[in-house]
Image (cartoon, helix red, strand yellow):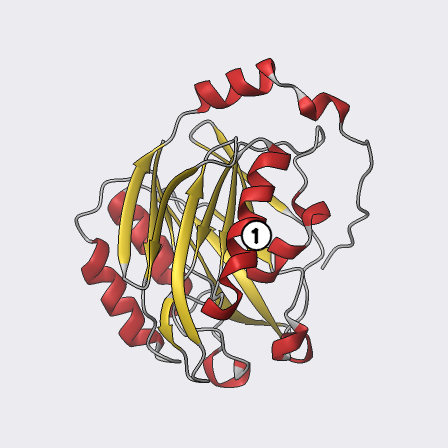
Amino acid sequence: MRLTLVQPDIVWEDSAANLLHYTQLIQQLQTDVLVLPEMFNTGFTMRAAAVAQPMNGPAVNWLLQTAQQLQCAVTGSVVIEENGRYYNRMVWAEPNGTMHTYNKRHLFRMGGEEKVYTAGSSPTVVNYRGWRIMLQVCYDLRFPVWSRNSRQNPYHLLLYIANWPEVRNYPWRQLLIARAIENQCYVAGVNRIGHDGNKVYHSGNSLLLNYRGEELWTQAHLPAVATFGISKKPLLQYREQFPAWMDADDYTISHQNE
């Protein structure tokens, strides 16, 4: 599978400008899955009322149109208003118009996110071109139980999209490596670069890891559109040779409908 990770600077709270930039950036791309950062069209803002869109708004329509044009899945998170509530929603769009969504579960209280947005209550694993892919957003990375690769809901690839500041880059990298090792899966962490509207600097450090936690690619401080081929065969062989998953504790998290 071809996997493309986009590490951009993001124009603060200007959805139209950001969507235009992405269109120009990826128009000739050939890939299977295209991954954009958290709040890819606005930056990580608490001004939800000013930037929120409905599910049929420009940002989600752009994801759907881009998926159709490039014949690949496209994903990133958008500030969504629905039934009087705001969500930091990761949207997965496919070429045939199919959509899957994941509402960020762990809201970043140090930034006041829990005061503005409604937390999700259900994890999302999508099936696409023979791969099972789990969707996660930023602060979710610190809570390994939520992303556990279980017998009930297994996956091959774990995606984390983020607006993760440079000042906390060490835990970003270490936690991504830990998620790959403990879940015996590929992990991609996709971050932004540049200063946001609150003067917080992001160095990117997007990272692709294999199922042993070994680095396949990373990039700091500079924009990037990086495409890689990853294969299920060595992943499945590794799980067979070192079947730690068979000794995992058997427990589940109760979920509530949102």
At x 35% / y 79%, what residue is drawn? 14
120 over 145 or under it: above or below: below
Examine the image and state in which quarter residue 171 appears: bottom right
At x 82% / y 47%, what residue is drawn? 254
Element type where label 1 sits in the image: strand
Q: How many labels does the image show?
A: 1
Q: Quadrant of the C terminus?
A: bottom right
Residue 252 in the image: x percent, y percent? 80, 40
94 over 246 or under it: above or below: below
Three-letter code for the amino acid on which mark 1 is drawn? Gln
Residue 43 in the image: x percent, y percent? 43, 73
Taking the image as drawn, is residue 84 in sight?
no
At x 54% / y 43%, what residue is drawn? 177
**166 and 91: which one is in front?**
166
The crowding category of the residue bearing disc 1, from other C-alpha atoms within 10 Å (few below 14, some 14 to 19, many at least 20), is many
Residue 201 in the image: x percent, y percent? 41, 75
21 over 173 or under it: above or below: below
**109 and 214: which one is in front?**
214
In the image, is 26 to the left or to the right of 235?
Answer: left
36 over 243 or under it: above or below: below
In the image, is 158 to the left or to the right of 68?
Answer: right
Residue 138 in the image: x percent, y percent? 55, 60
At x 32% / y 69%, what residue is drawn? 9
**254 and 139: which one is in front?**
139
Badge 1 is on which residue? 136
Taking the image as drawn, is residue 2 in sight?
yes
Examine the image and state in which quarter residue 73 appears: top left
